[in-house]
């Protein structure tokens, strides 16, 4: 069993924000690709169709591009707003994790509990943190700085075997 205590700091919250922004890169790239294709289509329409429709096609293409870019750039803002509305107890204090072959036990100033590995669907490493994402799209962050080299290797093994 690996036990570790993680303090919820501004750095930890910033890492969480970056992980959340980074995670949907595939969707972001798909949105950019669709925007590019539709923009080319509307440009083709503007060049080949009657003059009265040309202006409408160009305006729609510009509106579409601006809308997609605004939505993509606003993701950070929405994450920040959601974090600000969270209960203060969830964005401060400490977390103690007890990790073993059966799952993750956790304690904080708010309460305690235990999750089996079936509750988690993704794990990774970002900066000096392990992150785990559960089926409710919530994250567990574990600071590698509070772990020994052996514990880090053991966590990688457990996460790879249990989460994939």
Image (cartoon, helix red, strand yellow):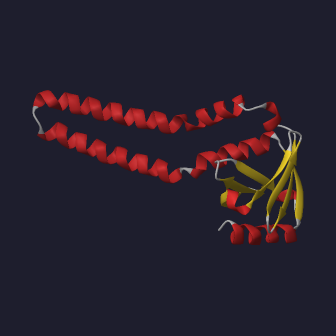
Name the spot of residue 134 as percent of width and height, x first: 67, 53
101 is higher (above) or lower (below) than 122: below
Name the spot of residue 106 as percent of width and height, x first: 84, 52
Residue at the image position 49 percent from the left and 54 percent from the top? 26
Is 95 positioned to the left or the right of 38 in the image?
Answer: right
Snapshot quadrant of residue 109: top right
**Which part of the image, by quadrant, shows the C terminus?**
bottom right
Name the spot of residue 42 as percent of width and height, x first: 24, 40
Q: Is residue 52 visible?
A: yes
**Which part of the image, by quadrant, shows the N terminus?**
bottom right
115 is higher (above) or lower (below) than 44: below
Is 96 positioned to the left or the right of 32 in the image?
Answer: right
84 is higher (above) or lower (below) than 153: above
Q: Is residue 95 visible?
A: no
Most foreground residue, 33 or 159: 159
Most foreground residue, 92 or 61: 92
Is 148 positioned to the left or the right of 15 in the image?
Answer: right
Snapshot quadrant of residue 13: top right
Residue at the image position 59 percent from the left and 51 percent from the top? 23
Most foreground residue, 99 or 94: 99
Residue at the image position 56 percent from the left and 37 percent from the top? 75
Residue at the image position 23 percent from the left and 40 percent from the top? 43
Name the spot of residue 41 as percent of width and height, x first: 24, 44
């Amino acid at each position: 069993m690996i036990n570790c205590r993680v303090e919820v700091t501004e750095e930890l919250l910033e890492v969480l924000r970056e992980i959340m922004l980074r995670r949907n890169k595939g969707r972001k790239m798909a949105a950019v690709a669709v925007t590019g294709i539709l923009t080319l289509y509307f440009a083709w329409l503007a060049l080949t169709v009657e003059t009265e429709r040309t202006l409408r096609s160009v305006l729609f293409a510009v509106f579409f591009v601006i809308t997609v870019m605004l939505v993509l750039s606003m993701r950070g803002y929405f994450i920040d707003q959601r974090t600000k509305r969270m209960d203060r107890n969830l964005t401060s204090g400490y977390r103690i994790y007890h990790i073993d072959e059966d799952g993750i036990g956790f304690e904080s100033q708010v309460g305690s509990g235990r999750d089996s590995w079936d509750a988690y669907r993704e794990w990774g490493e970002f900066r000096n943190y392990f992150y785990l994402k559960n089926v409710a799209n919530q994250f567990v962050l574990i600071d590698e700085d509070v772990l020994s080299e052996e514990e880090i290797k053991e966590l990688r093994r457990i996460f790879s075997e249990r989460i994939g």
